[in-house]
Image: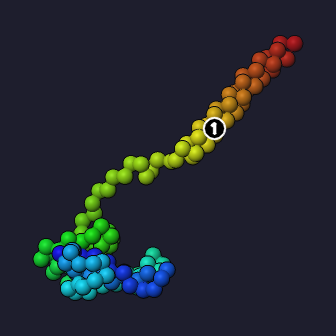
Amino acid sequence: MKIRLARGGSKKRPFYAIVAADSRMPRDGRFIEKLGTYNPMLPKDSEERVKMNMERIKYWLGEGAQPTDRISRMLEAAGELPKKDRSNPKKGTPGKAAQARAEEKAAKAAAAEEAANAPAEEAPAEEEAKAEE
């Protein structure tokens, strides 16, 4: 048993039904019960984007139905499931080009800082020489 998304809608206009279905059935095929809807075309802050019948979802979870990854994320956002720690360390690291740009920028900043420090050190020496005269 799975709680998953069944795609509907037309080409380039997706609309999904949240369904309880036998995991051996096709994605858009026969299902046991429709538990809600998901419309990804709506803005993320819209209340109409995800509608779920929480009472029936809790029933199916109690019967042993496994939510898919996307459905479990929706349930976590709704506060019905505890949040899982997800680890994707490569996602946070910048790409090769971005790393090269960052190194270049750091080198320029270091050179500019050295240039700024060098004249600042020489200037007091010149002032002292003028003061002695």
Badge count:
1
Q: How is the image coloured?
A: rainbow
**Image position, residue 125 (x, y; %):** 77, 17
> What residue is shown at x 15% (from left), y 81% (from top)?
59
SS of the residue at dot 1?
helix
**Image position, residue 89 (x, y; %):** 38, 48
Relative side of 5 to 48, left or right: left
Determine which residue is flagged by label 1: 104
Outermost right residue: 133
Outermost top residue: 133
Residue 132, can we see it?
yes
Q: Label 1 neighbourhood size at 10 Å, few (<14), some (14-19), many (20+)?
A: few
Query: Which quarter shows the C terminus?
Result: top right
- In the rendered image, which quarter is residue 75 located in? bottom left
Query: Does 128 sit above or below residue 25?
Result: above
Q: Nearer the viewer, residue 37 or 120?
A: 37
> What residue is shown at x 70% (from left), y 33% (from top)?
112
Query: Does 59 sit above or below residue 114?
Result: below
Residue 102, can we see it?
no
Query: Which quarter shows the N terminus?
Result: bottom left
**Image position, residue 47 (x, y; %):** 40, 83
> What residue is shown at x 63% (from left), y 38% (from top)?
104
- In the rendered image, which quarter is residue 55 located in? bottom left
Relative side of 117 to 69, left or right: right
- In the rendered image, which quarter is residue 49 located in? bottom left
Query: Does 58 sit above or below residue 96?
Result: below
Say what amino acid the circle numbered 1 marks. Glu
Q: Nearer the viewer, residue 53 or 70?
A: 70
> What residue is shown at x 46% (from left), y 47% (from top)?
93
